[in-house]
Amino acid sequence: MRLRCRNLWVSFRSDGREVPVLRDLAFEAGQGEFLTVVGPSGCGKTTLLRTIAGLIRPQVGEVQRIITAADTNQQVLLVFQEDNLFPWMTALENAAFGLEMQGVAKAERERRAGELLRRYGMAGRERAYPHELSLGMKQRVAVIRCFLSDPAVLLMDEPFGALDVQTRLKLQQELLDLWEQNHKTVVFVTHDCEEAVLLSDRVLVLSPQPARLIAEVRIPFPRPRAPELTLEGDFLTLKREIARKLGMVGAPRLAAPGAGRWQRPAGPDEAEGFEL
């Protein structure tokens, strides 16, 4: 499925006044594209996903879902930062829930869910309940549930934002591996510039609220992508470019004339630019 957002305007009432959240947003997500949206905290990224999902109706504009021949299931699923597992179900039952709703027989859905759970680090934990799982395990189950449901589009709202760095890196690779198997259309929201570059085909940069589209960055790296990519120079250049568009780092600058000599360029985690 392709998505086409046409001139979206969304606002809410607060203390008797209209608060604009999205302003004239227009973009497309192609069939099988991994599209990531970045923007300042509170700019309206979650509102955008909820609008695409049909949970919020825009005052102006529309979201078009363009069905293709590959869309045997036309469902659009939204994955939140919270895992949203059913506490009375085991990890296996939670992972298989979408298949159950589709009428898949119990033995078959548990076989398919069990295979993915074991493949992605959940061996021996299939019968555990959510309160017995770590945060990373719960989020892993939630992502597996979505891919097993086989939707046409996956909307992912910072699914790894609350995780520690090591767990987040591992789940990023697992997500890429799952996505490579069927190339679902994904719209992914994150605050993390590195995550955006690693996962995406294209990155959309939003302004502070009310959110408008201020930049589009295409990611040229071939797939599949390994974690080592994040250490390469071209990767770091793109990461800095997105951070600069977000206002997280300054533009390259020169010192006052006569400073005397070249200084080494700033490292990837330092302030931008170099001095003369």
Image (cartoon, rainbow, N blue to C red):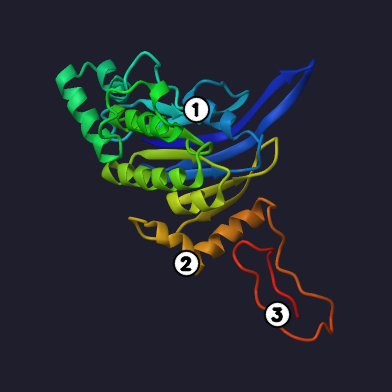
Q: From this view, report whether residue 11 is shown above or below residue 186.
A: above
Residue corresponding to mark 1: 82
Q: Secondary structure at mark 2?
A: loop
Q: From this view, report whether residue 38 is shown above or below residue 148.
A: below
Q: From this view, report whether residue 216 is shown above or below residue 124.
A: below
Left or right of 168 on screen, residue 191: right
Q: Secondary structure at mark 1?
A: loop
Residue corresponding to mark 3: 263
Residue 125 position, x and y percent, is 29, 29
Q: Are marks 2 and 3 in contact (CB under 8 Å)?
A: no
- Looking at the image, is mark 2 or mark 1 earlier in the sequence? 1
Residue corresponding to mark 2: 232
- How packed mark 2 is, by other alpha carbons closer than 10 Å (few <14, some 14-19, many 20 or more), is few
Task: Point out the image quarter for the N terminus.
Answer: top left
Could you give the CA–CA distance between mark 3 and mark 1, rounded to whole angstroms? 45 Å
Using the rendered image of the protein, determine whether residue 81 is visible from the camera's viewpoint. yes
Residue 193 position, x and y percent, is 56, 51
Kind of residue sitting beneath label 3:
Gln
Residue at image x 49%, y 62%?
235
